Image: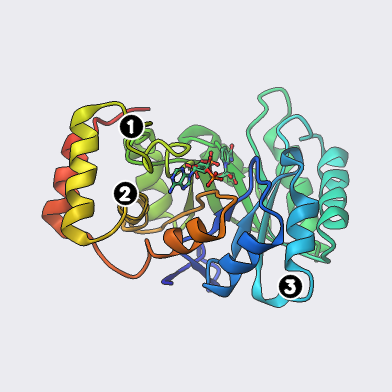
Amino acid sequence: MEFKEFGATGVKVPDIGLGTWQYRGGDAPIKKAVELGACLIDTAEMYGTEEAVGAAIRGMRDKVFIATKVSGNHLRYEQVIAAAEGSLRRLGIETIDLYQVHWPDPAVPIAETMGAMEKLVDEGKVRFIGVSNFYLKNLQEAEAAMKRHTIAANQVKYSLMQRGIEEDTLAYCQKNRITVIAYSPLARGALSTRTLLKNRRTLAALQQIASETGKTMTQVALNWCIAKPGVIAIPKTDKVERVVEMCGASGWKLSPSQTVALEKAFPVSV
Ligand SMILES: NC(=O)c1ccc[n+]([C@@H]2O[C@H](COP(=O)([O-])OP(=O)(O)OC[C@H]3O[C@@H](n4cnc5c(N)ncnc54)[C@H](OP(=O)(O)O)[C@@H]3O)[C@@H](O)[C@H]2O)c1
């Protein structure tokens, strides 16, 4: 597993973590991910998986980087504080490593939300602040609203099939040392299976590179993502063998010509 600096924090995180939206895998896949170094586990108050994550990491808290989120409909000051306390309780931990605003709510002033996020850091309940689904303008507004801390990460949709952040958000995050956490990096499984990847040209390109590299389609798709500076990916699976496969996406490199071939085959989309 390779590690990247997390934002400008000096802390290192793996370039592959594990997502848990709709996760029903029990302890074993999470434990396997941590064992293989994919120790960033992403959850959210709205996923209903914080208890499962908490149970799986019991006894190895010090080896895990826990990322969770306050829902975008809980962004008033007191709601953020209460949501964090609920997440801490369900996870059974004392500090959330990364607390993310799940999506922006234009009805709540961003300064109110970020003020609560900063208070949680001041109280030691949160180590690092993140946002999610914040594209350039929202991200800049959130940064401007902060007084004492900075935004370490922005969790956004990014995969070979969803490259909208390349328009401006990705470059901004790279320049300003905000880690991009790529969600749905397998396009919800479409990049992993022949049956789901309907476009013949894109399927052929992915299969061709998989055969050249001796990797699976999943590994090629994830490797393409994490090859970008400042980007890590959090694929989700319920299955131990797929955790092993996903971790095998780290630690090697596509050649420049393979990257070009892939990017040509997958049209830029939002
Ligand atoms: N911040 C946000 O708004 C937001 C939104 C969406 C997601 N996320 C985060 O990002 C994580 C990942 O995104 P995601 O869950 O949307 O999608 P994803 O990681 O792109 O894809 C996950 C899906 O791919 C399937 N899959 C994995 N490996 C496979 C293989 N080798 N063959 C066939 N299918 C395979 C998984 O099924 P199995 O489980 O059966 O393996 C699962 O259904 C989430 O869990 C969540 O933590 C965040």
Would you identify the image quadrant in which residue 159 lies? top left
- Specify the amino acid type for callout 1: Leu
Say which label, 2 or 3, has the lower sequence index.
Answer: 3
Say which label, 2 or 1, has the lower sequence index.
Answer: 1
Q: Secondary structure at mark 2?
A: helix
- Specify the amino acid type for callout 3: Arg
The dot on residue 197 is 1
Q: Is mark 2 within 8 Å of ligand 1?
A: yes
Mark 2, residues whose alpha carbon is within 10 Å: few (<14), some, or many (≥20)? many
Q: Secondary structure at mark 1?
A: loop
The dot on residue 61 is 3
107 versus 42 height, above or below? above
Question: CB of mark 2 within 8 Å of CB of mark 1?
Answer: yes
Mark 3, residues whose alpha carbon is within 10 Å: few (<14), some, or many (≥20)? some
Q: Quadrant of the N terminus?
A: bottom left
Taking the spot 35% from the left edge, 47% from the top edge, the residue there is 171
Residue that numbered label 2 is attached to: 217
Residue 58, x across and y down, in percent: 79, 70
Residues 141 and 258: in front is: 258
Would you identify the image quadrant in which residue 170 lies? top left
Q: Quick check: 2 left or right of 55?
A: left
Residue 229, x across and y down, in percent: 34, 58
Say which label, 1 or 3, has the lower sequence index.
Answer: 3
Question: CB of mark 2 within 8 Å of CB of mark 3?
Answer: no
